[in-house]
Image (tube, rainbow, N blue to C red):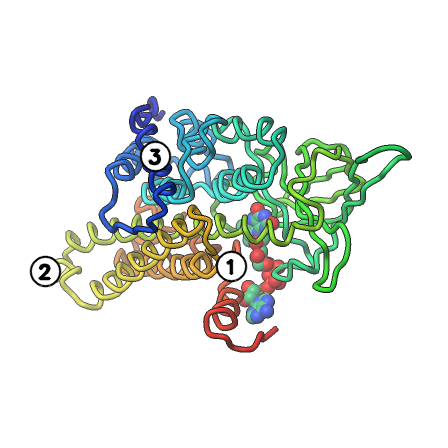
C-alpha cells in the first residue's frame, strides 16, 4: 500500500504564490524558458506522490473500473488538486500553469487522473472566475482539498461537437413577487465521466434561444438531486473513471445554482474549455513521457542481435520523432497556460496544445509498444493501460477535426467549413 504523501513545503507553496503574483503584477509579459525553482519543486513533489502509487496501481484500478481515490486524496492533502484555486479558499494560489504541471507529472508517473480536467480545471476555474461569493465559499475549499469533486456535463446524444444544439433546458419558475425562482432542468447528457465519484455536476443547459442557437447557461446540480437518473455507459477503455448517461427529469435547483449570468454560458463555457484542453494536453505529454522513458530503457537493454535493438534506426527514429513532438506539445502547453493565467486569449494555443499532445501521446505509445515487440502487449510492461486514454485524447474533450476547423478558420482566415 502506498505510504504517506510528501507535501510540498508551505514555504514552497508561498513561493509559488508570490511568483504568480509578482509576475502578474509586473505585467512584463516575460516568458522565461528556465523553469523556476518553484515549478521544479512542484514537479518533484507531485512525481514523488504519484510514484508511491505507480503504474501497477493505476492499471489495476483501470481494469476494475474503480477510482484512484487514494491517489486523489494524497494529492489533495498535499495541496496539488487545488494548486490553481485562490489561496483565500484553501488553494495553492497558482494558475493553470501549475495545474498543468500536476497533470503532466502524474501521467508521467503512469497515474493519469481524468477528473482533474473536469473538477480542478473546468469546475474550479469557472466557479473562481464567474461564481458568486456564496458559490466560491461553498465549493472551492472542498475542490481545493480534494474532498469534493464536481464533474462537467455538456455532451448530448444529438449535439456532440455542436454545443449550440444542446437540448437540455433549464426554465426558471418565478412566483409572483419573487426576484428569482427555482430552475427546473429537463434533458439528456451522455459520456459524463465520474458522476459516481462526484458530489455535484456543472451542467450546461439551454435557457433560451438567440440568433446563434441555444442561449446557454451553467448550473451546479447536486449529484443526488431528485429527478437525476444515472446509467452506466460501458466503454471499452481501460480507465478508472466511469462514464454515464444522465436523464434530467424535472431536476429542481435553487436560484443560487446558476453560475455567472443567464445566457452567458457560451462565453463562459469557452473560457472554461481552455483549461480542460490545456490539462488534457498535459496528461497527453505525461503519457508520452512515460511511454518514451519505458521504451528508451527497454531498447537500450534488449539485445536479440549483436547490439541492443535501440541501435537500429527503425526502433530509434520513431521514438526520437515522438520525443520531438512531445517537447513541442509541452512548449505549446506552457504558452496556452501562460496566456490563460494572464487573461489573454488562449483559444488558439489551447487547441494547438491539445492537438499536438494527443498526437504525441499516441505516437509515443505506439512507438514504445512496437519497440517492446510482444512485450509491448504484456501486462508486466504496463503500456497498454494508457492506449485507450491516449486515443480518447484525440476525440475528447474536443476532437482533432474540430481543432483543425478552428485553426483553419481563426488562424488561417479560411472560410468556415461547417
Ligand atoms: C471516455 C469518454 C469520457 C468523456 N467524458 C465527458 C465528460 O466528462 N463530460 C462531457 O460533457 N463529455 C464527455 N465526453 C464526450 C466527449 O467530449 C465527446 O465524445 C467529444 O466532444 C466528441 O463529441 P461526439 O462524440 O458527439 O462526436 P460527434 O460530434 O458526433 O463527432 C464525431 C466525429 O465526427 C467528426 N466531426 C464532427 N463534426 C465535424 C466537423 N464540423 N468537421 C469535421 N469533422 C467533424 C470528428 O471526427 C468527430 O470525432 C467523453 C467521451 C468519452 C468517450
Front-lying residue, 78 or 237: 78
Q: How many labels does the image show?
A: 3
Counting from the top left corner in percent of width and height, residue 207 is at 76, 50
Counting from the top left corner in percent of width and height, residue 65 is at 51, 39
For the residues labelled 2 and 1, the Cα–Cα distance comes to 39 Å
In the rendered structure, find residue 307 and report the number of the disc placed on it. Answer: 2
Decide which of tag 2 and tag 3 comes sooner along the chain: 3
- Residue at the bottom extreme, as displayed: 415
- The residue that label 1 is drawn on is 395
Q: Is residue 363 above or below residue 138?
A: below
| Label 3: which secondary element | helix
| Label 2: which secondary element | loop
The reply to whether residue 235 is in sight is no
Q: Quadrant of the N terminus?
A: top left
| Label 1: which secondary element | loop
Look at the numbered discs 2 and 3 and tell me whether their residues touch, using CB distance below 8 Å. no
Counting from the top left corner in percent of width and height, residue 174 is at 85, 38
* Other residues around mark 1 within 10 Å, as few (<14) / some (14–19) / many (≥20): some
* Other residues around mark 3 within 10 Å, as few (<14) / some (14–19) / many (≥20): many
Query: Residue sitting at 70 percent across and 50 percent down?
Result: 263
Front-lying residue, 64 or 364: 364
In the rendered structure, find residue 50 and report the number of the disc placed on it. Answer: 3
Q: In which quarter of the image is the C terminus?
A: bottom right
Amino acid at each position: 500500500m502506498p505510504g504517506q504523501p510528501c507535501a510540498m513545503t508551505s514555504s514552497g507553496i508561498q513561493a509559488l504564490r508570490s511568483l504568480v503574483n509578482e509576475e502578474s503584477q509586473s505585467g512584463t509579459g516575460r516568458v522565461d524558458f528556465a523553469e523556476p525553482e518553484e515549478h521544479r519543486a512542484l514537479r518533484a513533489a507531485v512525481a514523488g506522490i504519484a510514484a508511491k502509487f505507480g503504474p501497477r496501481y493505476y492499471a489495476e484500478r483501470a481494469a476494475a473500473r474503480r477510482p484512484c481515490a487514494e491517489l486523489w486524496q494524497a494529492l489533495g492533502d498535499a495541496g496539488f488538486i487545488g494548486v490553481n484555486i485562490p489561496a483565500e479558499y484553501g488553494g495553492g494560489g497558482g494558475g493553470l500553469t501549475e495545474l498543468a504541471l500536476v497533470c503532466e507529472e502524474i501521467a508521467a508517473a503512469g497515474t493519469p487522473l481524468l477528473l482533474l480536467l473536469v473538477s480542478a480545471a473546468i469546475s474550479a476555474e469557472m466557479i473562481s472566475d464567474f461564481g458568486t461569493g456564496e458559490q466560491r465559499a461553498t465549493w472551492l475549499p472542498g475542490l481545493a482539498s480534494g474532498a469534493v469533486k464536481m464533474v462537467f456535463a455538456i455532451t448530448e446524444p444529438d449535439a456532440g461537437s455542436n454545443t449550440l444544439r444542446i437540448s437540455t433546458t433549464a426554465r426558471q419558475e418565478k412566483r409572483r413577487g419573487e426576484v428569482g425562482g427555482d430552475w427546473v432542468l429537463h434533458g439528456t447528457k451522455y459520456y459524463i465521466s465520474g458522476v459516481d465519484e462526484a458530489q455535484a455536476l456543472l451542467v450546461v443547459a439551454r435557457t433560451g434561444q438567440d440568433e446563434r442557437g441555444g442561449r446557454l447557461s451553467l448550473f451546479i446540480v447536486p449529484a443526488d438531486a431528485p429527478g437525476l437518473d444515472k446509467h452506466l455507459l460501458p466503454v471499452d477503455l481501460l480507465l478508472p473513471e466511469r462514464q454515464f448517461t444522465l436523464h434530467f427529469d424535472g431536476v429542481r435547483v435553487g436560484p443560487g445554482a446558476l453560475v455567472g449570468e443567464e445566457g452567458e454560458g457560451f462565453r463562459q463555457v469557452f473560457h472554461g474549455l481552455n483549461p480542460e484542453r490545456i490539462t488534457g494536453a498535459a496528461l497527453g505529454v505525461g503519457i508520452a513521457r512515460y511511454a518514451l522513458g519505458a521504451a528508451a530503457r527497454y531498447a537500450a537493454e534488449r539485445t536479440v542481435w549483436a547490439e541492443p535493438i535501440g541501435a537500429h534506426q527503425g526502433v530509434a527514429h520513431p521514438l526520437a520523432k515522438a520525443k520531438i513532438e512531445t517537447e513541442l506539445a509541452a512548449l505549446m502547453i506552457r504558452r496556452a497556460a501562460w496566456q490563460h493565467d494572464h487573461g489573454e486569449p488562449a483559444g488558439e494555443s489551447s487547441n494547438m496544445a491539445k492537438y499536438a499532445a494527443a498526437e504525441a501521446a499516441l505516437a509515443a505509445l505506439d512507438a514504445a509498444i512496437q519497440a517492446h515487440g510482444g512485450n509491448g502487449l504484456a501486462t508486466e510492461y504496463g503500456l497498454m493501460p494508457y492506449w485507450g486514454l491516449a486515443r480518447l485524447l484525440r476525440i475528447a474533450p474536443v476532437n482533432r477535426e474540430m481543432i483543425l476547423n478552428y485553426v483553419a478558420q481563426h488562424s488561417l482566415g479560411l472560410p468556415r467549413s461547417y
